[in-house]
Amino acid sequence: MAPTFVGAHLEMNCTECGVTLPLPTEFRRHEVPCWHCGKPHPRSLVQGEAVTVEGDLIKIVPTPTELQLGDIIAANIDEQPRVKRILGTPGDTISIESLRLLVNTQRLEDILAAAPNKSVATLPVDYDSHRKQSRWQPQLSRSGWTRSEGKWRFTPPSASNANDWLIYHHQAVYDQMRAAAVMDDVPINVDESRRMAFVDRMAIGITSNAHSHATVEVAFFIDGETRTTNPVIIGESTIIRCDQASVSHGNAALELADVAPMAVRVTSGIASFDELNLFRSVEYRLRKYDDQSVFPITLGPTEYYIVGDNVPASVDSRNYGPIADSQILGIIEP
C-alpha cells in the first residue's frame, strides 16, 4: 500500500541532491538511480549507507455499518490479511477509460480529493530547494521572480505583473532529462521495469517565509486544458491541489502543456518561498497485462472492488476480481 502505508524498508539520502531514497530491504539492481535527480548509486554504496526503517504500525477496527469509496480496509485474501483501498461498493459500476479505472464514470482520485474525510495518496515529483538548477522558470524576461540559494522570491515589478507566471517544466529523470510529462513513478519500486503512464492530478506545496504576505493563483494543466485557482492567501505551509482549480484560464499569454503542467503567480504582496514542492496523486488504472474484457463490472449486493495504492505492483481486484463482504476483516487506522 505504499505510499500510504510502507512496510520495513531501507532509506538513504541521495549523494547528489540530498532527497530521501526509499528502497526495499532486498533488491536486484546493481545500481539505484535517484528518483529526483537521476544520480546512480552503486549497490555497494547503498548497502553501506542505507538504514533500516521499521514498517508502519496499523490497527484493524471493526467494519462500520456502511463502507465508503476510498476506505482503507484489511481483507482476507488467500488466508492472508491484505491492506487495500475500496474503489467500488455494492451497486457501483467499474469501467475503464484510457486504462484509468472509473467508478460510476468518475476517477477515484477525484472522488477522494472532493471528500473532506478521505486521505488522498500522493507521491513527490519535485523538491525545488534540492536542485542547483530549478525546473521552475519565469515566463517573462523582465520578471519579478528571482531565485537564490534554492529559494524563490517575488517582488512586484514597476509594470503590471498580470502575466508574470513562474512555470514548472518537467524532465524525464530516467531518459537524459529530456522535456517530458509527469509519469506514475513509484520510487520504492526500484526493480520494476515497465512503460510508465502519464499522470495529471497534481498539487503544489509552498513553505513561505513567516514575514511573507502574499496572495497567489496556481494554474494546472488538467484534462487537456489550463485551469486556474481562485486567489489563495499563502501561509507558512500551504498545499494547493489541482481540484481547487475550477476556473478556465482565458489568458492566451499562459500556455501550459503536459511537459509544463503547473504555474504560479503572485496577485498581491511580496512572496518569499523557502520551499516549492510538487506532488502527484496516486492514479488508479489497469496495467498493460490486466484483462480489459471484463469491464464494465457492476458489483453485486455483497461485492467490493479493491485496489492497492502501489498501483503498478499491487495484487488486487484487477487480478482476482471483486471480493465478498465476508472477506473484509475491518477498516484500517494508522
Image (tube, rainbow, N blue to C red):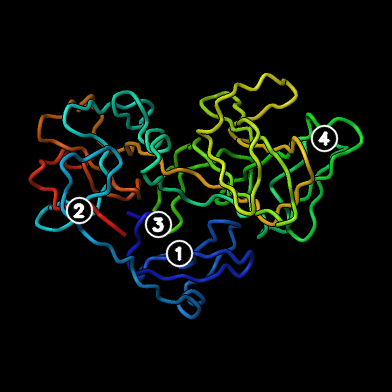
Q: Nearer the viewer, mark 4 or mark 1?
A: 4
Q: Are marks 2 and 4 in contact (CB under 8 Å)?
A: no
Q: Provide the residue designation for mark 3.
A: 189
Q: Horizontal and vertical percent for residue 278?
A: 58, 47
Neighbour tally class for label 1: few under 14, some 14-19, many 20 plus, Cα within 10 Å: many
Three-letter code for the amino acid on which mark 2 is drawn: Ala
Residue 84 relative to residue 302: left or right: right
Neighbour tally class for label 2: few under 14, some 14-19, many 20 plus, Cα within 10 Å: many
Three-letter code for the amino acid on which mark 4 is drawn: Leu
Q: Horizontal and vertical percent for residue 145?
A: 80, 44
For the N terminus, the image quarter is: bottom left
Q: Are marks 2 and 1 in contact (CB under 8 Å)?
A: no
Residue 134 relative to residue 46: left or right: right
Compute the Cα span from label 2 to label 1: 24 Å
Residue 6 relative to residue 328: left or right: right
Three-letter code for the amino acid on which mark 1 is drawn: Pro
Q: Provide the residue designation for mark 1.
A: 22
Three-letter code for the amino acid on which mark 3 is drawn: Asn
Q: Indicate which disc residue 140 carries.
A: 4
Which of marks 1 and 4 precedes in the sequence? 1
Q: Provide the residue designation for mark 2.
A: 74
Q: Horizontal and vertical percent for residue 156?
A: 85, 40
For the C terminus, the image quarter is: bottom left
Compute the Cα span from label 2 to label 4: 51 Å
Q: Horizontal and vertical percent for residue 163?
A: 78, 29
Element type at mark 2: strand
Compute the Cα span from label 3 to label 2: 22 Å
Element type at mark 4: loop
